[in-house]
Amino acid sequence: MSRDRRGFRFALQPACTRAEWEIDSIQADNAILRQAFNNAEATAASIESAIAAADAHLLANQGTNTLIDVDARRRALVYIGHLQGRLTDARQAVEDARRAWDEGLARLRVARQYAEGFERHRQTALAEHDAMVARQDYQAASDDWLQRLQWKDPA
């Protein structure tokens, strides 16, 4: 049954609204962190594919029966070493981005729990308001009934 709640005013509504704004802000920050994580993963994947391509090229040149070009092999190994260094840095960036994103999700979880506490308190206050309105309605009905009794029986 829907009650008339026109007289209800939740005293903590400004704090509840501020908590919702905080959730929105954290969600926006988490979207940025998620994008940074995706970019870091894509960078690491592209470096891994470049290493695989360089390794494949190096192995393909080894299989031929031609003379070994020591300079080209040295350059290829230096290049692969450089890529492996970049891959280490990229993997560290992925882990840092994941950690930052996980921290953002933890902040979001805490903010949502905080907002849910406000909502539970609001529901409790609403139930108390409904009970008070019901008591007032019953009291008014009782007073009305007693008044009508006096009008019907003039004796």
Image: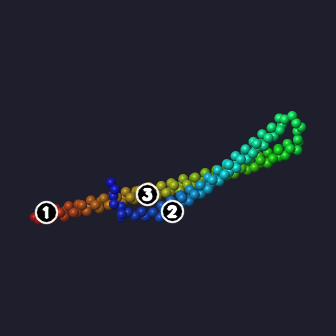
Q: Quadrant of residue 123?
A: bottom left
The residue that mark 2 highlights is: 18
At 51% from the left and 55% from the top, the residue drawn is 112
At 67% from the left and 48% from the top, the residue drawn is 41
- Sequence-wise first label, 3 or 2: 2
Name which residue type carries label 3: His
Q: Secondary structure at mark 3?
A: helix
Mark carried by residue 17: none
44 or 139, nearer to the observer:
44
Whole-percent x, y for residue 37 in the image: 65, 51
The residue that mark 1 highlights is: 152
Whole-percent x, y for residue 130 in the image: 34, 58
The residue that mark 3 highlights is: 121
Whole-percent x, y for residue 33 in the image: 62, 54
Whole-percent x, y for residue 118 in the image: 46, 58
Query: In 3D space, how far apart are the residues under numbered discs 1 and 3 (Cα atoms)?
Result: 46 Å
Relative horizontal placement of residue 138, taking residue 37 as reference (left or right): left
Q: Secondary structure at mark 2?
A: helix
Q: Secondary structure at mark 1?
A: helix
Relative horizontal placement of residue 4, taking residue 34 as reference (left or right): left
